[in-house]
Image (tube, helix red, strand yellow):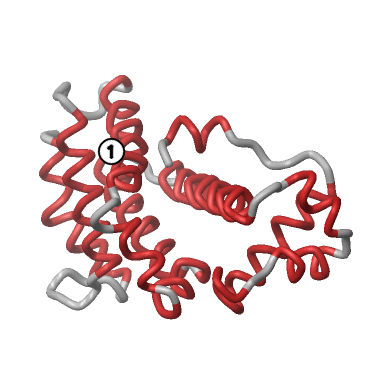
Amino acid sequence: MFLAEVRASAEPEDESTRRILDAALEAYQEFGLRRTTMDDVARAAGIGRATLYRRFPQKGDLVTAVGLREVRRFIAAVDVEISKAPNAEERMVEGFVAVVRGLRENQLLNRLLSSEPEAVLPGLTLHGGPVIALARGYLKEKIEEDQRAGLIADFDAEPLAETLARLIHSIVLTPDGRIPTRDERQMRAFARTYLVAWLRI
């Protein structure tokens, strides 16, 4: 899943599709992917099976659509937090906190990691290139925004973006360690001490 794909996706305009995605998300959060059938989603959405299959011919199509919407909403929420920051240093700090918090509290991600790790972890680890690429692309975009605004020095943003992406990826999958992930005051202090310096201000 790459950033361009997420950016190109859009909230569905018709009510039936929105109901389908809402019902699928709720079912995936409660029962997981394996145990949720297309019939379950159709019933929860209050539509017929034929309507569901016209929009999403395969279960994988529905899972992808739900995933894209979740990623799009996640990015929008992080954008809001970053936009509140008054300068580049605080954009780094608040962005780090918002991303870690958002991933840590994401119900769908937590449900799948706890109940279906064998289905989810390969896509996040051994075959996690697209996940890293998505995060790298987003973080590169934010760094380059600050560079164009003259807030930070001009340097190749991609290596830093990937370093940050891999740091957050590790924190989410293995939260136990010396980097704080629960106390937001401590998370901000960590980011100001160790991450802001990477901006080369």
79 vs 128, left or right, is: right
Q: Is 80 situated above or below 37?
A: above
From the top left corner, tell me how far across and down residue 137 is, in percent: 33, 35
Which secondary structure lies at badge 1? helix
The answer to which of 146 and 14 lies nearer the viewer is 14
From the top left corner, tell me how far across and down residue 8 is, in percent: 56, 30
The answer to which of 23 and 171 lies nearer the viewer is 23
Crowdedness near tag 1: few (<14), some (14–19) or many (≥20) residues, C-alpha within 10 Å: many
Q: Is 114 situated above or below 198?
A: below
The residue at the point 75 percent across, 57 percent down is: 20
The residue at the point 54 percent across, 47 percent down is: 68
Q: Indicate the quadrant containing the C terminus: top left, top right, bottom left or bottom right.
A: top left
The residue beneath circle 1 is 88
163 vs 113, left or right, is: left
Q: Indicate the quadrant containing the N terminus: top left, top right, bottom left or bottom right.
A: top left
Identify the image quadrant of residue 188: bottom left
From the top left corner, tell me how far across and down residue 160 is, in percent: 17, 38
